[in-house]
Amino acid sequence: MSEVLLLSGGIDSIALAAWRRPARCLTIDYGQRPAIAEIEAASEVCRQLDLVHDVIEVPINRLGSGVLAGQSGSEFSPNEEFWPFRNQFLLTLGAMYAMRYSLNSVLIGTVSSDQRHVDGSIKFLSQIAALTTLQEGKIDISAPAIHLTSLELVKISNTDSAILGWAHSCHASNLACGTCPGCTKHSETMRAIGWDR
């Protein structure tokens, strides 16, 4: 399959890039606070892995919520990084991009811990894949690591530490805040790998 990877520049999407070596990688600046750092991380990773990288800007920050949008949480979710319909939006853009470049699959770096969000669940990904394959272009949506932890994904991908070191997982800032869910997950994964020394 010819694939485009939604590359956020975080640990999971970087490991997926190293593992799957997609035809193209796409980073979307949708108005999230850490967009600059995410783009920088993704760009450098693609340069080192010799992958094609594109960035598109589709600002929807006025519709966001939670730490990614620099706001308080939402009444609709207990998760402080909740942004309504974010993955649905990103996957739709990924599918549009895939059609533009004659690709047939969109990869997303969802891992097992992301299933605490509805849009990170197996059911959600199955439903959106059914929707995009129903439409013209029949674009597949895939989360190859959905049954893996971040640590398992990093190990399977055999990602070089110099590449993974570029990961930017902070939800709140272009400089890691150290306390948001993204930073916490990043620290826990690096500690489990043994790279926190």
Image (cartoon, rainbow, N blue to C red):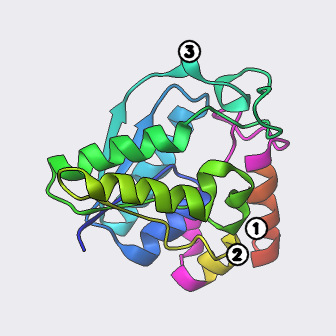
Circle 1 is placed at which residue position? Answer: 189
Work out how far the residue at label 3 is from the one at label 1, CA to CA, in angstroms: 32 Å
- Return the x and y of residue 55 as percentages of the image width and height: 34, 40
Q: Is residue 117 left or right of residue 80?
A: left
Q: Nearer the viewer, residue 79 or 53?
A: 79
Position of residue 138 relative to residue 58, above or below, is: below
Which label sits in the foreground, 3 or 1?
Answer: 3
Image-quadrant location for residue 83:
top right
Q: Is residue 173 left or right of residue 24?
A: right
* Residue at (79% x, 36% y) in the render: 80
Taken as a whole, is the magenta stretch helix, strand or loop? Answer: loop
Q: Is residue 3 left or right of residue 113?
A: left
Q: Residue 151 — which label? A: 2
Q: Which element type, helix, strand or loop, lies under badge 3?
A: helix
Mark 1 and mark 2 lie on one chain; the one further toward the N terminus is 2
Q: Nearer the viewer, residue 142 or 135?
A: 135
* Residue at (73% x, 48% y) in the render: 182
- Return the x and y of residue 40 as percentages of the image width and height: 47, 43
Q: Categorize mark 1 by other alpha carbons within 10 Å: few (<14), some (14-19), many (20+).
A: some
Q: Is residue 108 magenta?
A: no
Amino acid type, label 1: Thr
Q: Which residues are magenta?
A: 156-182
Work out how far the residue at label 3 is from the one at label 2, CA to CA, in angstroms: 34 Å
Q: Categorize mark 2 by other alpha carbons within 10 Å: few (<14), some (14-19), many (20+).
A: some
Work out how far the residue at label 1 is from the one at label 2, CA to CA, in angstroms: 6 Å
Circle 3 is placed at which residue position? Answer: 62
